[in-house]
Image: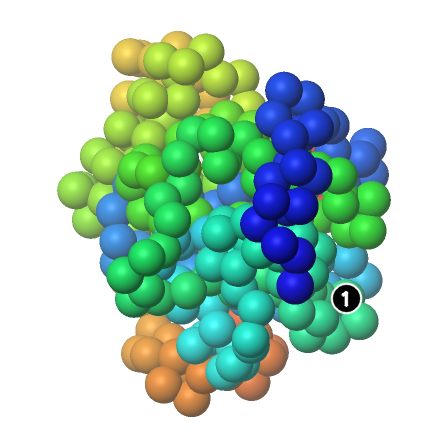
Amino acid sequence: MLGQAKRLYQLNSLINSEAESEPGCRIISITSGKGGTGKSFVASNIAIDLAKKGSKVLLIDLDINFANQNVLFNITTQKTLYNYLTYNENLEDVIHHYTDGLSLIFGESGKMDHPKLSEERANLFMNELKSLSSDYDIILIDTSSGLADGTLQILLKSDEIIVVSTTDPTAVMDAYVILKLLKSNDSSIPSNIIINKCLDNHAGIEAFENLEKATKHFLKTEISHLGNLSFSEDVMQSIQDQTPIIKSNSSHKLSVQISQISDKLRIPTIG
């Protein structure tokens, strides 16, 4: 374990630098305007499918102090982002190697002394992450819901953004707010939408079209529709079993839909 003084000295060189991710690697942040959209479920299953198809993937649970990817994967690890954010470990030292193609960085939950993801910490994190990007084809960041505690800074330094919404009008409105805040920060980062928990495909298309109309009219911004994911009670069972559905049942309708989305993510330019 690094001493804090040594760790801070190492990080000092990153504070004023602007690291670039390797040309072959994309950093994609998966976010949502509110909780309950299934963002972490989407992130975990996409990560597994991308790795299964041959991509080198790093999935990071950046839901500060409310992390749950470790629960979804049924993994207990001694080192998490908490160790990194308290300046006790390098980022590469908290990586958990799950399979040959998929690595994970887990967050923590319920720590009273957990550091907030300040803008400075977010910048340091992204710079150090980009310095590790040569080891991966795709880095997926499962952010916290909303834009508190440095999340906006993470999005602004990503190569692409995925906003997960549902057909619920309040979720669509919250997705619009995310896009509006990105626009107000002069972001030109490609923004892509997944509509989750759809009762049928038409409902998902309608929700996306409503969001698209609003962003075109008010924000003068283009967004891309990555796809719809059907509502299924089997999702709850997969969470209870702590086994991602695409791993336990690859022929399930949801697994097929996730696979179609991950195929689009393997293409360098979306939309």
- Residue of label 1: 101
Image quadrant in which you'd find residue 71: bottom left
Say which amino acid is labelled 1. Gly
Rendered-image quadrant of the C terminus: top right
User: Can I make out residue 190 in this image?
Assistant: no
User: Can I make out residue 86 in this image?
Assistant: yes
33 left or right of 137 in image: left
- Measuring from the top left, give residue 169's x and y in whole percent: 18, 42
**Looking at the image, which is closer to me, 33 or 229?**
33
**Looking at the image, which is closer to me, 258 or 9?**
9
Q: Secondary structure at mark 1?
A: loop
Rendered-image quadrant of the N terminus: bottom right
- Measuring from the top left, give residue 219's x and y in whole percent: 34, 13
* Residue lying at the far left of the rendered structure: 170
Which residue is found at the position 66% from the left and 52% from the top? 90
Q: Residues within 10 Å of mark 1 (few under 14, many from 20)?
A: many
- Measuring from the top left, give residue 172's x and y in whole percent: 25, 39
Which residue is found at the position 82% from the left and 32% from the top? 23
- Note whether 236 is above or below 176 in the view shown: below
148 left or right of 10 in image: left
- Note whether 142 is above or below 243 in the view shown: above
- Measuring from the top left, give residue 26's x and y in whole percent: 70, 39
Which residue is found at the position 48% from the left and 30% from the top? 120
Image quadrant in which you'd find residue 22: top right
- Note whether 93 is above or below 221 in the view shown: below
Total marks in image:
1
Report the colour scheme: rainbow
Which residue is found at the position 34% from the left and 73% from the top? 232
13 left or right of 176 in image: right
Image quadrant in which you'd find residue 267: top right
**Looking at the image, which is closer to me, 102 or 271?**
102
